[in-house]
Every structure is written in C-alpha cells, then in structure tokens.
Image: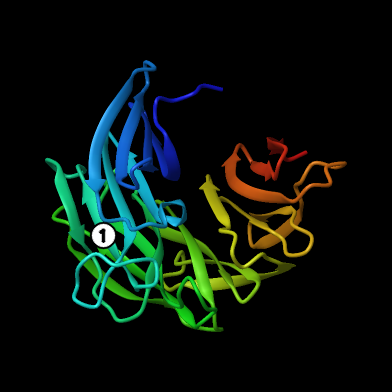
Amino acid sequence: METTPYRGFVVAVAWDTTGTYLLYIDSALRLRISKRQANGTYIQGRLLSTTMGPDGSLAQGDVVATGGRWWATWREHIGPGGGPGDEFDQTELFQAYTIGGTFSPRERVTTNPAWDSAPSLALPPATTFPVRLVWARGGSDFEAADSDLRRALGDQDGNWVSASLATAGSQNFWPEVQVVGRTTYVTWNRDGRTVQANNASGTFLSHTFLTSAAQDQRPRIAVAAGQVVVGWTTQAPFRAFVAERTGTTWSGKVASPTGVTRLQLLTGVSARGGTADASILSLGSRLYAVTET
C-alpha cells in the first residue's frame, strides 16, 4: 500500500503500461486527473473542471487510458440558463481527453432536459476508436424516477453518435462497459436486479440475475478469453456476489469472506485464466481480495 500526494474524493481510476491514472475531486472541489508513472513517479496532472458544484463527494465519472494518453467523462450540474448549477439542478455529461492527439479541454457532451449520470467508458483493444460510452438518463439524486440507459460511439474529435440501450423496467442505473474484440459487454442495475448484456450476436441480448442487488451500488464486469464475470452487492444483507459464465451457462455464489459481520460492498471483479477475483470493502473494517476456489 502506498500513500499518494493527492487529497480529495476518488471518481475513477485507469491503467495502461505507462502507469495509473486518477480522476478525482480535490480539496477545493475541482476535478483533476493525475498519474503515477510505472517507475513510481507522481505527476500533478491537469485541472479539468472548476464547476463541479458543492457535492464533490457525489461526483460521477470515468476514465480510460492507452499508450500514455487518457479520456475522461463526468457529470456536472447545469443551471436553468446553461451555466453552472447547484446540487438541485439537473446534470449533463462533459469530457476532456488526450487520446487521439493533443489535449482537448472540458467540453459538454449531452444536452437534455433529463438528468444524465453514471457514465462508463471503454476502449476497444488495439484500435482505440470508436470509444464506447454508456450512461443513465432520467431520475435524479432526490427521487427514484424512471431512468433508461443510452450508449454512444465516439471518434477522435470527441463527437458521439448515441442510441437507446435499455428502456425496460423503471430504474436502469449504474452501468459498466467492457469491450473485447468486436463485442461490447455491459452490466447495470434494474429495479433491484443486476443485468448483463452484450452484442456478440449482432444485437444486444440481456440476462437478468435472480439474486437481488442493492440498486444504489454499481455492479462490475470483467471479460477475458471468453470468460465473463459479473459482480454486485446484494440487498439486505449487503454481501458481495459474483456470477461467472462458462459457455452459455451462468453460475454464481457469495464472495464475501466468512465470519465478517459488517456490511460488505463489492468494488471490483477481474477474470484471468478461468478464475474470477473480487475486491470487497467491509465498511468500517478493511478491503478484501477474494479469489475463486
């Protein structure tokens, strides 16, 4: 474990062969991106936004990286006149990036009367473009209103072409996206259940897991060599659950360590060599790493 020189709230983390990237809100409630290089050197990075609003601990965004360059997207509150808003105003998505060329500073991505939130990014391996973006549209931070998912493809100039992804049910939220080859994999929560979908067949087909999910806790997905792993936090009691697909068959089990009575939140999953790993935060206690046995 290593303490960084940065202070604030973590929004998202990415990694490539050159180092680890940190998208975070600093102590002055500004959005920054910084980097720990592979040799252990810390880089101060760039200031991306000074208009994140007073609820910096609730910031939502994502970052991806390749070849020493990065792409970040996040949400900001927008006032009725289009300027910076407060925590009661709707949210829109913004972006900044260096992938594809020189630094492109903060620019607005969405313009819609509904709240745009919970963005997730993914890069296709080798080709980089188009960048994949999935996010939630609808609802708000104050009520459980209907929300759907949208997906978009982005080019090196920061332009996006979007379409609807998920409209069934009432509350579709907290998506996470991965790309392997030509296939896009997505997981998210819908009305207290976790869903996985992919377009390997040419169109998006989904699978809804029966084990309950805490709607306000983001599920995670990992894909490697045909192995698909999805993890989420169950509802009452809060425990980490991991499902794995072999061929066309899903199996799953509780991943939380036995004997731990505190609330446990799943924070990440990985897939490697046919084995699934999960990282789990035990509230008020510690962070666990669990490997499939």
User: Would you say 117 lies left or right of 286 here?
Assistant: left
Identify the image quadrant of residue 79: bottom left
Residue placed most toward the observer, 33 or 268: 33
Q: Is residue 69 visible?
A: yes
Q: Is residue 125 visible?
A: no
Residue placed most toward the observer, 168 or 235: 235
* 48, above or below 154, in the image: above
Q: Residues within 10 Å of mark 1 (few under 14, many from 20)?
A: many
User: Would you say 80 lies left or right of 168 here?
Assistant: left
How many marks are shown on the rendered structure? 1
Residue placed most toward the observer, 178 or 38: 38
Q: Amino acid at mark 1?
A: Phe
Q: Write the residue at 30% across / 81% down.
A: 113
Colouring scheme applied when the structure was drawn? rainbow
**Image quadrant containing the C terminus:** top right
* 38, above or below 289, in the image: above
Q: Write the residue at 59% across / 64% down.
A: 216
Q: Position of residue 232 (x, y in %)?
A: 64, 57
Q: Secondary structure at mark 1?
A: strand
Q: Position of residue 18 (x, y in %)?
A: 33, 26
* 280, above or below 140, in the image: above
Residue placed most toward the observer, 76 or 14: 76
Location of mark 1 (residue): 94
Q: Position of residue 49 (x, y in %)?
A: 24, 50
User: Would you say 48 lies left or right of 144 here?
Assistant: left
Identify the image quadrant of residue 37: top left
Q: Write the residue at 55% across / 72% down.
A: 206
Identify the image quadrant of residue 154: bottom left
* 220, above or below 224, in the image: below
Q: Position of residue 95 (x, y in %)?
A: 25, 55
Q: Write the residue at 66% across / 64% down.
A: 214
